Image (cartoon, helix red, strand yellow):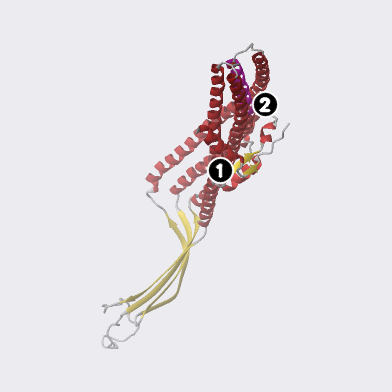
């Protein structure tokens, strides 16, 4: 059952419509279809709208109101002197005016002249935060590129493991076939045949795990790139053959402090917090505005007002700000101090990240050298043990162990070269150079 299922899986994968894809193509697709970058784009739009909103506070406010009213029969007594010179008996004899309706309208406009700097500081703060959001988007883009590289390399490693186990399985099956013939002719102990069959079974199980890892890596890559989950991707095998030029550790540390987008974004947020302190202190000052308005009213048989235009300067001051603003200022200053401490902590963490990435790079190069020698040693060891076995100077177990050691050495070497690509990109990411063009050796 295991052999049948394994054969069907291999057959389906072998005849599936593979889609060749390079690393650069994978990066372009991941950037195009990234949900995180779409979220960042929406945040940038929101920050830009906040800047426009802050700029709009410099514009005048204008309002209009009007009403039409129906009234009962009010008693109206106008306390004004009569313009006539007649005596007490010289009145016209007419009674008070009967008012049943009223109509009025008002238009007001106000242009801020001074608001304690709150408008200007609000504009500056919103611009700083907009720049921070843009830098966050760039930083997330670099992290996305690194994640894509890692997923691509994992896909390559999974595919390489499948290929190596397939090759080893063919060799193990051929050995079992040969041993079976020898055992049937009485030239080989049954125990030796069982050992060869056990190795074949172990290889089949390892191949099954490798197939599962390959399929999962395919699904993960397809989801990242926005492709159908059934797409079978074929990574470029030359991706691990490139070698890179690496500078000294101090160069990468200085580059990180200069080019890291998260450091720059934090600096903008710190500046926005400092401006926020000034804006809060501005609440201690009065607001001055240029005002103007127009009033019109019509009360039939009683009063008509037209062309009542007014213009002037208005001053407003919230006296409660004298005892309420102090706490607000302390909150704003504490926020600024928090961001300053966060900057220092970020500086230390970035130095640690660069050191770790650089040491990982050196380690990866050493691993490649060691595993390259290990392949030569394992191949030579298998050749010697195989010759001894053919001359009946080595046991079957020794032959199987030599075969397994050679397979493991080839796997280690392939994985080490693939991991070196990931480690190198992690070094570029930690030093803020991932999005910049690099020169290969």
Q: Position of residue 354 (x, y in %)?
A: 59, 29
- The answer to whether residue 371 is seen in the rendering is yes
Q: Is residue 197 magenta?
A: no
Asked whether 329 or 168 is in front, the reply is: 168
Residue sitting farthest toward the right: 441
Look at discs 2 and 1 and give the one toward the viewer: 1
Q: Quadrant of residue 102?
A: bottom left
For the point 72% across and 35% down, the residue is 439
Left or right: where does residue 17 sit relative to residue 42? right
Q: Position of residue 47 (x, y in %)?
A: 52, 50
Q: Position of residue 338 (x, y in %)?
A: 47, 35
For the magenta stretch, what is the residue range?
Answer: 397-414
Asked whether 211 or 68 is in front, the reply is: 211
Is 105 rendered above or below residue 17? Answer: below
Residue sitting farthest toward the top: 393
Left or right: where does residue 338 sit relative to residue 408? left
Number of other residues with Cα within 10 Å of mark 1, as a class: few under 14, some 14 to 19, many 20 or more: many
The circle drawn on residue 248 is: 2
**Rounded to the nearest whole Å, what is the CA distance between mark 2 and mark 1?**
34 Å
Magenta segment, principal secondary structure? helix
Q: Which residue is mark 1?
A: 224
Q: Is residue 409 magenta?
A: yes
- Is the Cβ of the residue at disc 2 closer than 8 Å to that at disc 1? no
Is 103 rendered above or below residue 363? Answer: below
Asked whether 39 or 345 is in front, the reply is: 39
Q: Position of residue 253 (x, y in %)?
A: 62, 29
- The answer to whether residue 139 is seen in the rendering is no
Q: Quadrant of residue 80?
A: bottom left
For the point 48% across and 46% down, the residue is 279
């Amino acid at each position: 059952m295991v052999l049948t299922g394994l054969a069907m899986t291999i057959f389906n994968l072998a005849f599936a419509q593979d889609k060749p894809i390079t690393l650069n193509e994978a990066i372009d697709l991941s950037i195009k279809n990234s949900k995180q970058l779409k979220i960042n784009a929406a945040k940038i739009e929101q920050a830009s709208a906040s800047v426009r909103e802050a700029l709009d506070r410099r514009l005048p406010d204008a309002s209009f109101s009007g009403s039409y009213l129906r009234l009962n029969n009010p008693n109206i007594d106008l306390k004004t002197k009569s313009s006539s010179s007649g005596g007490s008996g010289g009145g016209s004899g007419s009674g008070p005016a009967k008012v049943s309706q009223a109509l009025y309208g008002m238009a007001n406009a106000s242009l801020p002249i001074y608001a304690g700097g709150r408008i200007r500081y609000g504009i500056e703060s919103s611009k700083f935060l907009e720049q921070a959001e843009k830098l966050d988007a760039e930083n997330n883009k670099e992290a996305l590129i690194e994640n894509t590289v890692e997923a691509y390399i994992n896909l390559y490693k999974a595919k390489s493991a499948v290929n190596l186990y397939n090759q080893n399985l063919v060799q193990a099956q051929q050995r079992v076939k040969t041993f079976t013939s020898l055992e049937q002719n009485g030239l080989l102990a049954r125990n030796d045949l069982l050992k060869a069959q056990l190795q074949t079974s172990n290889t089949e199980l390892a191949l099954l795990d490798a197939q599962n890892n390959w399929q999962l890596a395919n699904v993960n890559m397809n989801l990242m790139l926005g492709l159908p989950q059934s797409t079978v991707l074929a990574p470029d095998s030359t991706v691990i053959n490139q070698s890179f030029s690496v500078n000294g550790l101090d160069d990468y540390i200085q580059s990180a402090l200069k080019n890291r987008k998260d450091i720059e974004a934090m600096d903008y947020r710190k500046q926005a917090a400092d401006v926020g302190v000034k804006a809060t202190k501005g609440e201690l000052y009065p607001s001055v505005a240029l005002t103007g308005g127009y009033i019109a009213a019509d009360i039939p048989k009683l009063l008509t007002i037209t062309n009542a235009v007014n213009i002037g300067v208005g001053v407003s001051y919230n006296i409660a700000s004298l005892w309420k603003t102090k706490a607000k200022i302390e909150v704003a200053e504490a926020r600024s101090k928090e961001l300053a401490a966060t900057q220092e902590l970020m500086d230390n963490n970035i130095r640690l990240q660069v050191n770790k990435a650089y040491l990982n790079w050196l380690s990866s190069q050493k691993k490649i050298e060691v595993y390259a020698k290990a392949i030569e040693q394992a191949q030579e060891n298998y050749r010697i043990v195989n010759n001894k076995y053919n001359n009946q100077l080595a046991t079957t177990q020794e032959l199987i162990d030599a075969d397994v050691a050679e397979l493991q050495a080839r796997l280690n070497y392939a994985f080490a070269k693939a991991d070196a690509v990931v480690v190198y990109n992690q070094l570029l990411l930690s030093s803020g150079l991932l999005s910049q063009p690099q020169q290969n050796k």
